[in-house]
Amino acid sequence: MKRASSLLLAAGLAAAQSTTVVDILMPMADPQTLLASVISADATATSYFISCPTVTSSEECGFADGLEVLNGPSTMNYAMTISETYTLSADCQLQPTANLGVCTASMISGASTSTTVDTLSDYSSFFIPVTVTAGLERLSATTTPSTGGMPQITQNAVLAGAAALVGGAMLL
């Protein structure tokens, strides 16, 4: 009986640490629930693959095939392929002390390319909380935070951990 409760407790603690929430600069997105996998991370930037939850239709989310985002204190860029002939991308140079970003966005449709340059004043208002579900070990390997926001333990992870502790105590 004690062994089962120990396993339940360990599973609950693992569940509590299986996700984290980071704030990612995404000026092209509406506030919504998004998931991410960490592709790579170092002291200057973190690369994420962003996608929609499986229960969300691609019409609601807008990132049907996902997109890759590179986020750091002074840079943000993304690339998203919508079809074989349609690609969106952006590259932003950020000035954190001025809360200002200068972004170059490109749209490629067939043989046609359109490019615009825009200045984001108050770019910090464009951060979206994103739940990281894979590659968490890459985040912990960095020595300096490389996302625009601070990692946070999610409410669901805390609840799962608490439920496991209560369940383990009940088995005793």
Image (cartoon, rainbow, N blue to C red):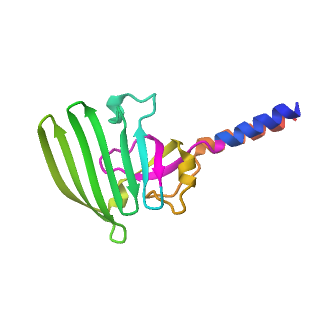
Q: Residue at x 38, y 51 (%)?
A: 70
Q: Say which quarter of the image contains residue 143.
A: bottom right
User: In the current view of this chain or complex, which residue is farthest to the bottom?
Assistant: 97
Q: Vertical placement of 85 versus 73: above or below?
A: above
**134 up-or-down from 1: above or below:** below
On the image, the x and y values in percent for residue 125 come to 36, 57
Q: Nearer the viewer, residue 167 or 110?
A: 110
What residue is at 46 percent from the left and 42 percent from the top? 36
Can residue 1 be seen in this snapshot?
A: yes
Residue 137 x/y as whole percent: 57, 48
Asked if residue 74 is positioned above or below residue 34 in the image, the reply reads: below
Q: Is residue 71 left or right of residue 101?
A: right
Residue 25 among those drawn in magenta: yes
Q: Could you say which quadrant of the image residue 54 lies in?
A: top left
Q: Residue at x 82, y 31 (%)?
A: 4
**Occupied quadrant, residue 49:** top left
Residue 167 is at least partly visible in this image: no
Query: On the rendered structure, is 39 left or right of 16?
Result: left
Query: In the image as oriented, which residue stretches furthest toward the left?
Result: 112
Q: Quadrant of the N terminus?
A: top right
Residue extent of the magenta highlight: 16-41
Residue 48 magenta-drawn?
no
Q: Residue at x 48, y 45 (%)?
A: 38
Q: Quadrant of the C terminus?
A: top right
